[in-house]
Amino acid sequence: MTEYKLHNVRLTILGEQQDLKDDTSPLQKTEQRLQALLYEYGDNNWELQWTEEDSDGQTRCRAAIRPGLLELHREGAVRTHMEIREGQETSCTYQTAMGTLPMTIRAERVAVRRSASALIIRAAYALPSWGLHSVVTLRAEFMR
């Protein structure tokens, strides 16, 4: 049986996107604040779980986190399994009510930092087929 510590956390998800070919284009930002569960397995191995809601319904989300890797699973109104693996290119599909979109992810950096108060993950990557450069930051703050 795998041992872990379970934490209730306040999760903030910050997204930034910009045109891949024009770094003077406006930066698009999104922010979500949610309650989440953080499983801490030790040896730099974590898993976050949360649920997102929008007009299309609920989406269950899970992020597996290790140094150099952010693996996102989404099931519900949106479905995808994305691997953002530092220094590598990966492919996946992004399934929505409007159809399935192929996606290539060219990961630049995945940084993970754990402090006494939070786990912070920051991934920078390009989505060449969509013409975007993205940075996502997940900040899981431990609730006292």
Image (cartoon, helix red, strand yellow):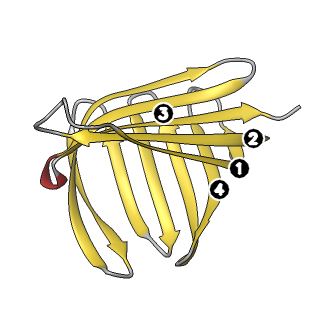
Front of the two marks 3 and 2: 2
Above or below residue 100? Residue 64 is above
Horizontally, residue 28 falls left or right of residue 140, namely left
**Tags 2 and 1 touching, CB below 8 Å:** yes
Task: Using a 10 Å C-alpha cutoff, classify the residue at mark 4 as few (fewer than 14 neighbours), some (14 to 19) or many (20 or more).
Answer: some
Q: Amino acid at mark 4?
A: Trp
Q: Amino acid at mark 3?
A: Arg
Quadrant location, the C terminus: top right
Report the disc number at residue 36: 1
Task: Measure the alpha-carbon separation of dots 3 and 2.
Answer: 18 Å
Q: Mark 4 highlights which residue?
A: 50
Horizontally, residue 41 falls left or right of residue 126, namely right
Above or below residue 85? Residue 63 is below
Task: Measure the alpha-carbon separation of dots 1 and 3.
Answer: 18 Å
Report the disc number at residue 66: 3
Residue depicted at 36% across the width and 54% down the height: 82
Identify the image quadrant of residue 43.
top right
Task: Give the farthest residue toward the left.
Answer: 21
The kind of secondary structure element at disc 4 is strand
Residue depicted at 38% across the width and 60% down the height: 81
Q: Mark 2 highlights which residue?
A: 9
Which of marks 4 and 3 precedes in the sequence? Answer: 4
Q: Is residue 103 visible?
A: yes
Q: Amino acid at mark 1?
A: Ala
Task: Using a 10 Å C-alpha cutoff, classify the residue at mark 3 as few (fewer than 14 neighbours), some (14 to 19) or many (20 or more).
Answer: some
Which of marks 1 and 4 precedes in the sequence? Answer: 1
Q: Amino acid at mark 2?
A: Val
Q: Position of residue 3 (x, y in %)?
A: 73, 41
Q: Nearer the viewer, residue 72 or 124?
A: 124
